[in-house]
Image (cartoon, rainbow, N blue to C red):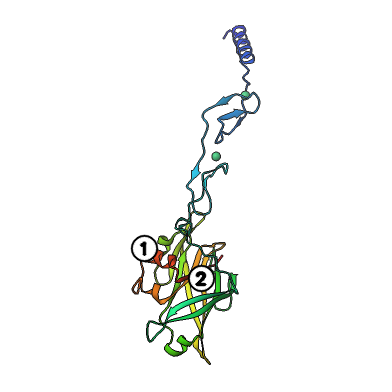
Amino acid sequence: MNYKKWLCGAGILIMGCMLSGCCMSHEWYEATCTSPRVCSKCGETSGEVKGHELEEANYQQPATCTECGLTEGDVLQADYEKYGIICETKVDTEYPFVNKCYDNDELTTGKVIFSDYDVFLSDDVHEERDGYEWRTATATMIFDDENANEYGVGRYSYSISDYYDIQGANESWNNNVFTVNYNGKDYTEATYEVEVLQDDWVGDELIINLRFFISVPVGYDGVVFWLCDSQTRSLYEEYMNAEQELKVVQSDGTILFRLK
Ligand SMILES: [Zn+2]
Ligand SMILES: [Zn+2]
């Protein structure tokens, strides 16, 4: 080997490197969403920009890059907002509830009050469920006018609905178990149960007390308890599909209480 020649070659290589600004060993910063990889020593770049990894928008978050957190656009529109359905019912406030009488088509004007709204992880009868919490409130209905006393109170109805995705909850419904989507994830084990604490006449007042318990993902504010009068009740038979449910929650004869 010609040692002199080799040295000379190395010299040219080093010279060349110095002129072009490259370093002997680059130290690369990884490429990011908006930049290719960059040498921390000399600033040289190589490769390609990674681009954002956008995860689809959901009801709580707009489309979001999983790498850098950049967001784009809006959250998905909740069904209740899309259809202009207002539910601002507050606790400890009386709302009129007009229902048909039992014996005839006369109307009785009762009232309904929601109270004791609570969110908890477990109690004596409701066990803690991984990733879920319990939301509960009491609905008290009172009928005490002349027509109620004379002709009784006809059939009304109640259940729950999903503020964000009416159809999703409706179509997944199976024996009071249903699915809600929270932060882009489907929770398939949401549950609904009602205890009728009271349903009888006390003097000339018919008092109905319902306590409902709903198990939803921790932090989920989309369940709406609804109570509809007998006129609205006639919009569906025993079961209601999503279309009928939309009509029920849009009806003036329905009181909506969002567990929020
Ligand atoms: Zn470098
Ligand atoms: Zn990004």
Q: Where is residue 47 shown, x and y percent of the image?
A: 52, 28
| For marks 1 and 2 on the same chain, the one whose residue lies earlier in the sequence | 2
List the residue tagged with mark 1: 243
The one nearer the camera, 142 or 72, is 142
Residue drawn at 52 percent across, 73 percent down? 213
Residue type beneath disc 1: Glu
List the residue tagged with mark 2: 214
Q: Is residue 240 left or right of residue 121?
A: left
Quarter placement of the C terminus: bottom right
Residue drawn at 43 percent across, 87 percent down? 152
Residue type beneath disc 2: Ile
Q: How many marks?
A: 2
Residue drawn at 40 percent across, 85 percent down? 102
* Label 1: element kind: helix
Q: Where is residue 217 shown, x and y percent of the image?
A: 53, 63
Mark 2 Cα-neighbour bin, 10 Å: few <14, some 14–19, many ≥20: many
Q: Quadrant of residue 95?
A: bottom right
Report the image quarter containing ligand 1.
top right
Mark 1 Cα-neighbour bin, 10 Å: few <14, some 14–19, many ≥20: few
Instruction: Tell me, for residue 37, which label it has, or none.
Output: none
